[in-house]
Image (tube, rainbow, N blue to C red):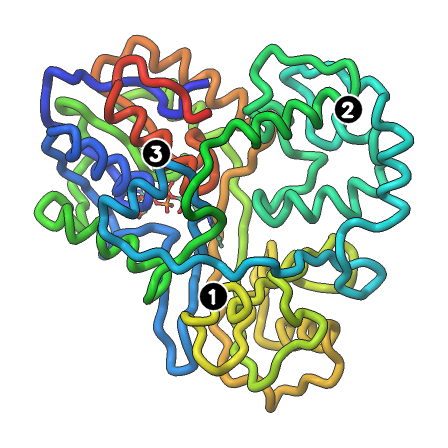
Amino acid sequence: MKRIIGKINPESRHVNIWGAGFSGLILGYFLKDQGYSVTIYEKSNKVGGKIQTKRTGAGLVEKGPNALFLNQDGLELLKELKLEPIPASKKLRRLLMINGKPKGPFQFGLFTKMATNIFKKPPLVSDGLTVADFFRPLMGQENIKHYLSPALGGLYATPADNLHFKSIFSQVGNKAQFNSYWTFIKMMLKHQKDQPKLELSGSVSFEGGMQTLINRLAEIMKNDIKLNYKEPFRIKGNTIICADAINASELLKDLRPDLSSALGRIQYRQLCSATVFLKREIKSLHKAFGVLIPLENGYSSIGVINNKAIFPTNNGNVSSYTFISSKLVSDKEVLQDLQLLSSDITKEDIQHIEITNWEKALPIYDLQLFLSVKKLHQLAYKEENLAIFGNYVAGISLREMITAAKAFSIHPLDYTSAE
Ligand SMILES: Cc1cc2nc3c(=O)[nH]c(=O)nc-3n(C[C@H](O)[C@H](O)[C@H](O)COP(=O)(O)OP(=O)(O)OC[C@H]3O[C@@H](n4cnc5c(N)ncnc54)[C@H](O)[C@@H]3O)c2cc1C
């Protein structure tokens, strides 16, 4: 499915963009690069949306994304922007909370179960299939709960039982069916192998954090962005809505009620990020990227990111960890999670805590989102100069948005999809 809904008229060389989060900025940047003039209307007093880095006395805090996972388009973009990426440390352990302890995810029980079932035929791929439905015959419900859901939760903050298979594994194609799990795995490995080899890969950040990327885009478009914009929404000339689905639905309420109602059905997940600066390291997370925590483990958090291990140069002398929860947490609950991870840590070890609550953090990639986006594509098919873009249609990660925005800017009428 195309990664931008609707289209613009390339003969009219001006584009109005509503929303200056990453989707609006990156689309504005690529369109400008193709010779369009752009105006970006942002209702708040700052650009970047969910991307916000705060400098505290203790160190940098990423309130939203902490990294950009590179693909070829991402790497080319950083070169064009003359930004020096800081690569994430290599060979960090990826841990999962198993029986109350952070451990490597490849446990014997899981491995033998999967090896036994690898030649089984998976369920047919259909619009209604969830990720859990697909993998249940391979790994069993218990392993879905303990391994798969937390692993996917690290990206989508949603359990496998709700995640829509075709949306999460869009690279398998709309019509693909599999004779066995082995065929599926081989196809995924081939897809990975076919990706171009990059001189730099993996996750990167920047000196000054992710805000540096936003500041650079904003600097290039400084004369094109109108902050605190409160005038009524209009569809005048080429118009692209880059607000989240809830605000996009509100914008289109009177002018395009059909589009508005499809957008309004997209659900969002709450996320709270609590960055803690500690005077000492959490030993069980030594040389680890972090730990994913299955639900019902006594923790408020669904994952902990070890900031200092990932980007040492951005994180000075103190240890810094970000606890991610799917509800608003207090300082006390963060301390409780810290003590569950490492019983010797006391309140006195905490130098600073910074809590950010995102009421509507991420769109839930479930069947409802898939159906809404499908409907939006059908409804917007006849639009001449209206498009809709954001992380609920382009993909949740920044790199997917870069690829989709670049493709659209080059071929706004018939661009190739992000995959
Ligand atoms: C805690 C967290 C961690 C994440 N970590 C990562 C990560 O490490 N790597 C990664 O790739 N991705 C990550 N993501 C996902 C990524 O941050 C988002 O997908 C992306 O930033 C969303 O960009 P967006 O432009 O679609 O939406 P937003 O960032 O929500 O931007 C929308 C913009 O539209 C504006 N707006 C809203 N309504 C109007 C209106 N009526 N008029 C004008 N403007 C309007 C808003 O003010 C905002 O500026 C993370 C997300 C969260 C919440």
Work out how far the residue at label 1 is from the one at label 3, CA to CA, in angstroms.
35 Å
* 378 is higher (above) or lower (below) than 303: above
Whichever of labels 1 and 3 marks the residue nearer the N terminus, that label is 3
Work out how far the residue at label 2 is from the one at label 1, CA to CA, in angstroms.
36 Å
Work out how far the residue at label 3 is from the one at label 2, CA to CA, in angstroms.
39 Å
Amino acid on which the number 1 mark rests in the picture = Phe
Percent x, y for residue 343? 75, 81
**Disc 2 secondary structure class:** helix
Q: Quadrant of residue 245?
A: top left
Whichever of labels 2 and 1 marks the residue nearer the N terminus, that label is 2
Q: Give the labeled residue for mark 2.
A: 181
Q: Is residue 368 left or right of residue 263?
A: right
* 122 is higher (above) or lower (below) than 291: above
Amino acid on which the number 2 mark rests in the picture = Tyr
Determine the residue positioned at 18% across, 45% down: 230
**Mark 3 vs ligand 1: CB below 8 Å:** yes
Q: Give the labeled residue for mark 1.
A: 311
- Circle on res. 248: 3
Amino acid on which the number 3 mark rests in the picture = Ala
For the view shown, which residue lies furthest in the bottom direction? 348
